[in-house]
Structure formats: structure tokens, C-alpha cells
Amino acid sequence: MTSMQFGLFTVGDVTPDPTNGTVVTEHERIKNTITIAKKAEEIGLDVFATGEHHNPPFVPSSPTTTLAYIAAQTEKLILSTSTTLITTNDPVKIAEDYATLQHLADGRMDLMLGRGNTAPVYPWFGYDGSKAIELTIEHYQLLRRLWDEDVVTWQGEFRTPLQGFTATPRPLDGVAPFVWHGSIRTPEVAELAAFYGDGYFANNIFWPKEHYIRLINFYRQRYAHYGHGEPEQAIVGLGGQFFIRKNSQDAVKEFRPYFDNAPVYGHGPSLEDFSEQTPLTVGSPQEFVEKTLAFADYFGDYQRQLFLVDHAGLPLKIVLEQLDELGEVLPQLRAEFDARRPANVPDAPTHAARVAAKIAAESSPSSPEPVEGATV
Amino acid sequence: MTSIVIVTAGLSDPSTTRLLADRFAESVRKQDGDATVSVVSLRELAHEITDATLTGFAPPRLQSVIDQVVAADGLIAVTPIFKASYPGLFKSFFDVLDTDVLTGKPVVLAATGGTARHSLAIDFAMRPLFAYMQAMAVPMAVFASPYDWGSEGTNALVDRIDRAVAELISLLKGNGTGRGPSDDIDLFSDTFLSISNPPTD
């Protein structure tokens, strides 16, 4: 694995194929997700992340079930989420579910926390949607303690108090799963990531880069403010999306009906305008490589790049073809990102590296106490 | 010296609307030490206002209040919202004013209501009234529901009152509303501060 991680993130939408009206069943969609994850490992990707949703047309409501199933059928792939809902999940259940996944996957996992963007979901889980940011903060502060402390006594606003509680199983090797915080508009989430020295992920799909530059720069500055390192050493992840064919015009022609009918931006801007104004690439492999490499110019050298590929009703066959195309240019992407990367920019976090750092810190008595909550 | 008159149409005693009016008075004194602030309660003038609507002229006590309102540099109008709009007492007071006496006068609009679902009454009922009178309603209006008087909402309410009063004072000094779009992130908000101060046992 190189210093930067590449992977896929899926929303898990069941969208009719606009070219022929075909709709896969939920069963097919879930099984296709597994096929896509295994293909990700086959083409040399590092990460597969699934969303969490509790309403149609989305199928992935139980991320750790799906990810554990993938972990059992892969060797190297890091399993992650995009996102795990920190607002509406009980932090005790998150602590236990993801620690279990961590053991089953031998550390090949991390998770990305997010607020979710569906207002009605809050009452389904007994919460008040107007408290989304407060829930995010309180739940994460508790989750952090459930992983970092063996016995927790806690009292807060949104769940029953805990008296001498131990979340089980304890994190693998005494190192909690690495946490990314995903946000597309909330500076408080960037602040939360910065305070704890966690990663920050910008989905980088819907809007022009300037929007995400502002949030990422804010996170980098606050990361340094809290003493975790220089701004350029903060741990940043980005999304992206593409549709590539050898011939650029073929890509545009084939993807246009999917773009025009896609959830979120379909029936809105033209494919050409959207490609020009956002990080979407529809074109040749080299156009894709150039546009993706430019992300580091805008956002600084970063650690994780995830792509959205299986969406908008694209049939499995085309998704797998897209992954073959991605696999062909992946070595070039890795080499060029590594070539431009300054030595002081940290590698993408892995369980093994974090365990090694913990052992090193413990065996060197002269080293200062790590900052509380700092990434080890 | 700046003179500000606060007109409140709270009907009960004590009244939430009067409470909101008093908060505005505090905010004015806090932000402009030279300003004179007076609060006029329409409840105490209810009979005179009714008389004036029937006779076409204001009795002496009401006339002195009208003179005070007309002479003020700025006005703050505070009313309860009943049945989707302001009560008749509030409207009747402005009905008995001559049509043009509020022309060009900066006015802050504020209201209380039993539920947050009344909050747009400021914009669909109060604002057209002052638009008709060609007063200059400041952009920031303040609506207080029961939530805003609870422990959670109070800070935000005080903050909104301060912003509305700041607009009024800025307008009176000839500086526009003194506000513009801002990309600043408030690192010292309660929410932000809670992030770096997680609760301990």
C-alpha cells in the first residue's frame, strides 16, 4: 500500500436504469454491492466504504453486517463507511458494532461519521432533528470515551447515563478504529475532527471545489491549533466521481442518460456544465487522471480518495467495466500523487501503523505524553 | 441625543410582550449609553384608543403619547400575535395616527406568540402595516415563542434582540444597517466551545 489510499464509496441507491427501465431488487442490489467490493480489491483499490440509510430507495441500513461479510471474502481491502450516522445511532451500539468488525477484519476497517441529511430519520430512532449538531458532538464525545477508556461513567443530555460501563469487545490491540468525520457544510464537524486529531472527509461531489476548500482549510488550521501537527499534516479525505471510456465522446454519450436522471443533480444542470463546475469527470482516462491529480493543488496533499461509481441506475456490468478502467490508471495515479507529496505529509492511517506508533510511544519513556485524543 | 420609544401591545399584566419590550430597552441602553428610552404600554390607553377611533380625535393622555412616538428618532413596536396576527388594540393605535407621521422613521418589529408557528406573522402582518405608513422597518425582526424564554433559547433571543437594536442604532447614525454577508465562523459560540470541552465524570 502506498502513502495514499484509493477506494470506492457507495450510497446504495436502487435507481431504475434510465436507458431501459430495469430496476434491480433489493436482494440483487445488496449482492451487487458485495461483487463491487470484491472487484475493488481485485483492481488494487485500498478501501471500500458503504453508506448508511434507513429509507427507500437505499438498501444499506446495516453497514457492519455488510462490511463483515466483505471482510470475510477479501484479504487487503480496508472496510469503511460513508457515513455512519453519529446522530441517530446510539454511541454504545456504534462502539460495540465497529469494535466487533475491527476484530473480525483483523484491523482492516475504519469508519466515517456523519450527521445524515434526511430530517425524518431522527424521530424513527427517537431523536429530535433540530438537535443534529448537539447530538453529533455529545454522541462522538461519548463514543471516543467508550473506545479509549475501559470503564466509563457518563451523563449527558440525549441518552440515559452510564455507570461503570464497559463497551465490549475492547478495541483490537488497544487501538480504537480510526475515525473520519464527513461533512459538506458544517464547520462544527470540522472542529470536532480537528480537536480529536481525527480525519476529515469532504464528499467533493455536489458543489464546486471552492466550497470544500473553505471547510478543509478551516479543518487544517484547527488541527494545528489543537497541537496535532502542521496544517498540511492534517488527515484529509475526498470524494470524487467519474465515468471513463477510452474515447472521451463515448463516455459522454454513454453516461448522459444516467447523469440526466441521477438522484440529487439529475434534471438540473447539463452534464457539460456540471463537469466544468464540479469535480465530476466524464471523459478519457487521461482527462480523469489530470482532474483527480488537481485535487491536491486545491486541497493540499491528502490521504484518501474515494470514488462514487455504482449509482444513478448504472447496471453492474458497466460498474465493473468502470472499475477495470480505474484499475488501469490506478498505478499512474499512485505514482503521480506520491511524486508530488512532501515528506512531512503523513501516510493514510492503517491499523498496523497506528498499533506500531502506540508501541513506539509506550516504549520510549523520554517522549512527551501524547496530546489527549491525538491520533497515534 | 437619540430618543427611542418602545410601544408594547401586551394585554395581560404581567405580559410576555412587555417582558420582550423591556429586553429591548435594556439592549438599547447597553448599546447606546446616550439614548433615552421610554416604554409605552397600550393596555393602559385602551379606552382612549377606542374613544379616538370613534371620535376621530385623541384624548389628552393619548395625544401626549402620540406626540412622543412622532417625535422619537426610532420606534420599537412589540405586539403579541393572536389568531395569526396582531390584536385589534395594536392596529387601532396605528389607525388613529395621521397617515404620514411615521414616514421615514426607523422601526424595529417584534412579536411574541404562544407557538413558533406564529413567527411569520411579523412578515405577513406587521411589515405591510409599516410599509403602508412608509416607516423604515429594519430587516432584522424578533419573534419570541415559549421556547425562547426557556433555558435553551434565551441566549439566542438576547442575541437576536441585540442584532435588531444594532441595526436600528446604525440606521439612526446614517450607517445603513451596519450588517452584510459574512463567512466568519464563530469559534466562541456555545456549540463550538462544547467541542473542545467534553464533559468529565
Image: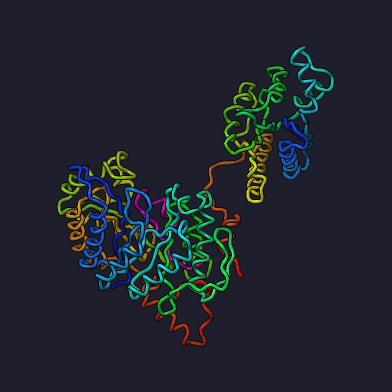
Q: Is residue B189 visible?
A: yes
Q: Residue furthest top?
A: B55
Q: Residue furthest right?
A: B60
Q: Where residue B31 appears, x then y in whole percent?
A: 72, 44
Q: Quadrant of the N terminus of chain B?
A: top right
Residue A151 painted magenta: no
Closest to the observer, A235 or A146: A146
Residue B75: which quarter of the image? top right
Residue B169: which quarter of the image? top right
Q: Where residue A96 appears, x then y in whole percent?
A: 43, 69
Q: Is residue A342 visible?
A: no
Please tell me which residue is depicted at 33% across the width and 64% down the height of the picture. A65
Please tell me which residue is depicted at 34% across the width and 51% down the height of the picture. A205
Residue A212 painted magenta: yes
Q: How many marks?
A: 0
Side of A121 where B129 appears, left or right: right
Q: Which residues are magenta?
A: A196-218
Closest to the observer, B78 or A278: B78
Q: Where residue A204 appears, x then y in whole percent?
A: 36, 54
Figure check: B106 above or below A97: above
